[in-house]
Image (cartoon, coloured by chain):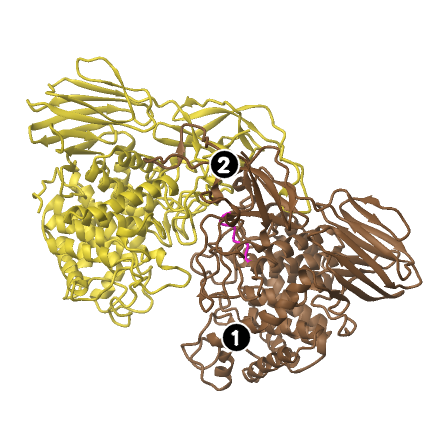
Chain colours: A brown, B yellow
Amino acid sequence: MTTRMTRATARPVDPTGARRGLGLGELRLGDGFWGSRQRTNATATLRHCYDWMERLGWLANFDAVASGRTGADRPGWQFSDSEVYKLLEAAAWHLGGTPDPDAEELFSALVDRIAAAQDDDGYLNTCFGHGSQPERYSDLSMGHELYCTGHLLQAAVARLRTRGDDRLVQIARRAADHVCREFGPDGRDGICGHPEIEVALAEFGRATGEPAYIEQARLFIERRGRGTLAPVALLGPDYFQDDTPVREAAVWRGHAVRALYLAAGALDVAVEVGDEGLRDAVERQWTRSVERRTYLTGGMGSRHQDEGFGDDWELPQDRAYCETCAGIASIMVSWRLLLATGEVRYADLIERTMYNVVATSPSADGRAFFYANPLHQRTAGADVRPDAVNPRAEGGVRAPWFDVSCCPTNVARTLASWQTYAAFVDASGDTEALVVAQYAAGGIDVALAAGSLRCDVSTAYPDDGSVRITVNEAPDAPVTLRLRVPHWAHGAELTAPGGRARIVEPGWAEVTAAFAPGDVIALSLPTAPRLTWPDDRVDAARGTVAVERGPLVLCAESTDLPAGAGIGDIALLPGAVPRADRDGAVVSAVLRRPLPPREGGPPFGPEEPVRADRDPVDLRLVPYHRWAERGPATMRVFLPLG
Amino acid sequence: MTTRMTRATARPVDPTGARRGLGLGELRLGDGFWGSRQRTNATATLRHCYDWMERLGWLANFDAVASGRTGADRPGWQFSDSEVYKLLEAAAWHLGGTPDPDAEELFSALVDRIAAAQDDDGYLNTCFGHGSQPERYSDLSMGHELYCTGHLLQAAVARLRTRGDDRLVQIARRAADHVCREFGPDGRDGICGHPEIEVALAEFGRATGEPAYIEQARLFIERRGRGTLAPVALLGPDYFQDDTPVREAAVWRGHAVRALYLAAGALDVAVEVGDEGLRDAVERQWTRSVERRTYLTGGMGSRHQDEGFGDDWELPQDRAYCETCAGIASIMVSWRLLLATGEVRYADLIERTMYNVVATSPSADGRAFFYANPLHQRTAGADVRPDAVNPRAEGGVRAPWFDVSCCPTNVARTLASWQTYAAFVDASGDTEALVVAQYAAGGIDVALAAGSLRCDVSTAYPDDGSVRITVNEAPDAPVTLRLRVPHWAHGAELTAPGGRARIVEPGWAEVTAAFAPGDVIALSLPTAPRLTWPDDRVDAARGTVAVERGPLVLCAESTDLPAGAGIGDIALLPGAVPRADRDGAVVSAVLRRPLPPREGGPPFGPEEPVRADRDPVDLRLVPYHRWAERGPATMRVFLPLG
C-alpha cells in the first residue's frame, strides 16, 4: 500500500494521496523554540515519565500479569497501560532521530515487560481478563481496552518506520490480529468508549501494508453513533460520540479528546477507502467546531464536568478546560486534513495550538505539566511538591504527575516527532512543491522526484518574523517552494532569489524556480503585537480584548503587577496600542482602585459600575505559554476595556 | 429548653433568643403567589414524589431491610432514604396546617415501612450494615448515612411540633441516640461527608429539649475542617468543607449544598451554646459569599464539576449551576441569621432566592422540576417524557424525576412550610414587634406578650407593590409593626393609621402604636421594571444588563422572539428604559443580523466585532421563575448592550 520508509522519511502519518509529510530526518531542528523543547523532552521528560510509572506500579502491572499475580489491588486507572505505550512511542521517535543508549535501554526494558504480559492469543491488557479481574471487554464504555491497544499500535508504527520489524511490532501485530478476530464482521458488534483504536489501526494498516487493519478501523467508525455503549452515571451517549454516526454529525461534542481521536481515525479511513461523504463530514465538523467552540489558544473543551466541548459560543475564559491532550488531538486531526486538502487553515490552527497549548503544558525543565489550560486564573495555585501526584494540575501550577496522567506522555510523543508536523511534499500540482507550514531554525533535506533539495532555515521565530531559507542543493528542474503566510501576517514580504521583496497575503506564498546553491528565499512576517477581538457571540469575552504577537497569545500575570493590584483590577485604555517588549509586549492600562466594600447582597446593582482608576501604567504582557513559570500567579489573556 | 409549641406556632427553626418565627398557623396564606404554590405542592407534588419513589424501589429498600432481603441490587443512590424523609417532612408540615386524609395515609404508610427497617440499636439505613452491604460507617466520605439520619430528624421535628410525640419521633429519638453513642466524645472521631446531621441534631435537641443532641451537633462542627475524610477521586477536602475548621473559614467553598447545610448547623450550635466566634464566622462567610459568589437570582454554585462554589467573581451565566437545593439551603442559613441578628439583608436574600430559585424549580402543575438553574440557555432542551428519569434536568426542561432527585422533595418541604420563613416576633426592643419579612396575601394571628394581634394582609405581590394590613384585633398596649422595605424599593411609601404617606428607605420601616380594629397600615413598593448592572469584576456578565421588577428577575425567552432571531441576537439599545407589561416588562432592543460565515479559525479576529442591526423591536421579558413553561426555549437574563 505504501512504500517502505527509510529512517529519514519516518513519520507518524502516511496517508494515500498526493501529499506526504516530511520525515524525522528530513527536517533538522536547530536550537530554536522547538528544537530546545525537543531536546529537553529527550533528556528529561522520557526518564521523568518512566520513573513516575515505575514508582506508581504502572509498569509492574505488566509483571503481575506475566507472573499470574494480578490482584484486586492493581494500581493505576484502567487506562494506565496506554501511558506506557505513549512513552514507548515517544522513545521510538526520539531514537529514530538520535542515537541515545539510555533511551535505547529504557525502550528495550519496557518492551521486555510488555512482551511477557501478552496472552497467547494476542490480548494484552493489565486491567482485564486475568485472575480475578473483570472479563475481557466486559466494560466497553469505560474499560479503555481497545484504547490501550490503539496506543500500543501507534508505538509500533513509530518503531516499524524508524527501525523496521522488531519485537514491539510483532507484539502489536498479534494484538491487532486479536482485535480483528474479536471485533471483526463476525465478532462482537462493539466499539470502545474512548476512540483511539480507529486512528491506530488505520496507521498500523498503512505501516504494515495490511488492509485488514484499515477495514477493522472502518468497521469501528461505522458502528459508532448508534447508542450501543452502556450509559455511565450522568454521562450521556454524546460523551462517547455514540449519539450520532460520524458521517451525520454536524459538530464535535462530548469529551474533547474522544471526539478528536475519533475524527482523526475517521479521516484516515475516509482517505484510504475513498469515502468522500465521511471526509466531508470531518471537514464540516472541523469548520463549525473551530469557528464556534475553539479558544484563541487553539484549546478545545469548555467544560470541566465531562472534559467536553460546550455549546456553540460557550467559551468561558476562567473555566476553559482546554486539556493538553485535546490540543494534541486537534493537531492530529488538522495535520491529516492538511495532507488531505492542502488548505492553509489547517496549518494555521496547528501553529496556534502548538505555541499556545502544547508549548504551555511542560515546564521549562520538562518535568512538570499542565493538564488544563485556562485563559484566566483568578487565584494563584499552591506550590506543588515535586514528589506529589496532583489530582489534575488545574490550579495554575504545573505538576510533575497527575492522578489521570495522560498529558505528560502525550506531550512527550508530540515533541519527539515535532518536525513531522512542519512540512510536506505536495505532488498535486504541475511542479512538485516543498511546503513549509511551520517555521523553525534548522534545515531541510528532502528527496523530490526531480532530485534532492537541501536547504538551511535561519530564523528566530516566533520572537522574530524573519525566515531565511538558503539553498544548498537543488534539482536541475524547477520545483516550488511554498511557504505559509500565517493568518495574522498582514503585510508579509517574500523575496525570491534575485528578486525584490513583494507583499504576500496570508495563505500560501510560493516561488517556483530551478534553484541553485546559494539561492536565498526570504520571508518577512510582521510580528508587532496586535489586538485581537472576540466575536460578539462569545459572551464570556464581551468587552475585552487580547494581545497577540506573531503566533503567540500573550497574557498579563500578577507577577508583573505593582504591589496591591490584582489581575482583576486591570483595564486597557481605549485606543491603547501594544508595543513589542522582550518576548512579549507592553500596553497602556489602568489599574482600578478597589471598590468600597458593599454588604448586603449579590454583586449586581442599580448603578452602572464605575471604579476609580489609578494613574496609567505600562502593563507588561508575556507569552501565555510560559505563564506561572515564575511561581504561582493569577493571569488573564482577555483584558477588559476601560 | 424551649416552651412546647402549639400546632399553630409549629415551625422548623426555633432558636434561643429574642426573635421567634411565626408558626404554620399564625400566618395564613391566601390565593396569592405562594398560597397557590403551597396548594399545588400539597395536591400534586407529595403524591408525585411518593409514586416515583415507590416505582423506583426506594421505598421497598426499607421493606428489604425489614425482611432481611437486602442484596447487591439495591436500587437508588446511597442517599435515597433521605428523599423519603424529606417527603415525610413535607407531609408533616402540610398536615400540620391542613386536614388531609390522603396525606395522612401516605404519611402513616411511610412510617410503617421505615419503622420496620430500624435496627434494635437505633441504626436506620437501607444501604449499609445489612446482609452483604458494606459495614456501617465504612464510607464516611460518600456514604451519606448521617446525612440520611439528619433528614429523618428534621421530619421528626416537623411531626413533634405539629402533632406531639408519635411513632416517627420515637424512631428519630432512637436514631439520634444511636448517633450520639456511636459518634460521641468516646465514640468514633468521624464526620459525615455531607453535612446535615448537624443542623438536624441541633433542631431535634431544641424540639425535644435534649441538650445531648445539641452537644453532638457541636462536636460534629468542631471536628470538621481537619482533613479526616478520605479523599474521593478528584474531589479535594474543600469539596466536603473538610479543609478548614468552620470558625476559621473566610468564605463558602466546595459543594454548595454541603457548605450551606453546614453553615446552618454551625449557626444553630453557635446560638445555643453562645459561641460568638462561631457565629461571627458564619456571618463573615455569608457576607463574602453573597457579595462575590452569588447570582442575581440568589442562586449559589458556579460549577457543574463538583456542584460547587467557584472563585470570587466566577459567576458564569450559561453554566451557572445554582442547584435548587442550594437555594433552599441558602434560605435555611439566612433565616437563622435573620432570627439571630434581625438584619434586613438576610430577609432580602431570602426573598431573592424564594422568587428566583425556589419558585423556578417546580412546573406549574407541581410534577416536574429543575435541578440546575442557569441564567442563560443557548440550546433549547429536548422535551422530557413524563415517565422518564432525567439525569439531572440541566438541559432547559423541567423533569419529573432525576437520577439524583434531591430537589423535588426539598422543594416540597420548603413550600409546605413557606409561611414559617415570612414573619417573626422580635422581643429585643422596647416594644414587642411583629416583623413582616415577606409579603403574601392572607392573614396573621399571633399571640404577643401584650395580647393577641390579628390582621388581614391584602396584596397582589409581587405583581403589584401595594400591601395593605388591616387590623382585626390588637393588644391594648402599643406594639410595633415592622415591615421590610426591600433593597430595590427606592421611593417606597408607608401610611400609618390616621397618618399620611411618608417615604421610607430600604430596610425596616415601622409603626409603633396601640392599634385598633379597622386600622390600616399601607405599604406601597415601587415595582416598575428596572435595570440591574453587574459589578465589573463579574467577568461573565461584562457589557450586559438585566431587568428586574420588584423581587422578580426577568429574562428573554426565544418563545417571544420573531422567527429567525435567536437568543444570541439580542442587544439592548443604550438608554433603553423597560416598561411594565403583564407580569414582566417590555424594553427596546435590536436583533442583530447573522454574521456572514467565517471559516478558518476560532471566533477571534483583528477587527472589533460589528453586526448589522435589524429595526428596533419591543422585546418582551418574562419572569425568570417561569421560563421554559411554554415549551423548550433558549433564554437569557443578562442582555448585551448594543
Dominant secondary-structure state across the stretch colored magenta: loop
Range of magenta residues: A318-323
Kindly identify which residue carries mark 1: A51
Crowding at dot 2, Cα within 10 Å, few <14 / some 14-19 / many 20+, comes out as many
Q: Is residue A208 magenta?
A: no
Image height check: is B139 above or below B420?
below
Who's the residue at 39% across and 51% down the image?
B307
Whether residue A555 is visible here, answered yes or no, is yes
How much space separates mark 2 and mark 1, taking CA atoms? Answer: 47 Å
Residue A37 placement: quadrant = bottom right
Who's the residue at 27% across and 48% down the image?
B263
Whether residue B632 is visible here, answered yes or no, is no
- Percent coordinates x, y for residue B128 in the rendering: 26, 66
Q: Amino acid at mark 2?
A: Arg
Q: The disc numbered 2 marks a residue on which chain?
A: B
Residue A263 marker: none
Secondary structure beneath label 2: loop
Q: Amino acid at mark 1?
A: Asp
- Percent coordinates x, y for residue B324 in the rendering: 35, 45
Camera-near label (2 vs 1) is 1
Image height check: is A186 above or below A514?
below
Kindly identify which residue carries mark 2: B542
On the picture, is A520 further left or further right than B108?
right
Secondary structure beneath label 1: helix
On the picture, is B35 further left or further right than A443?
left
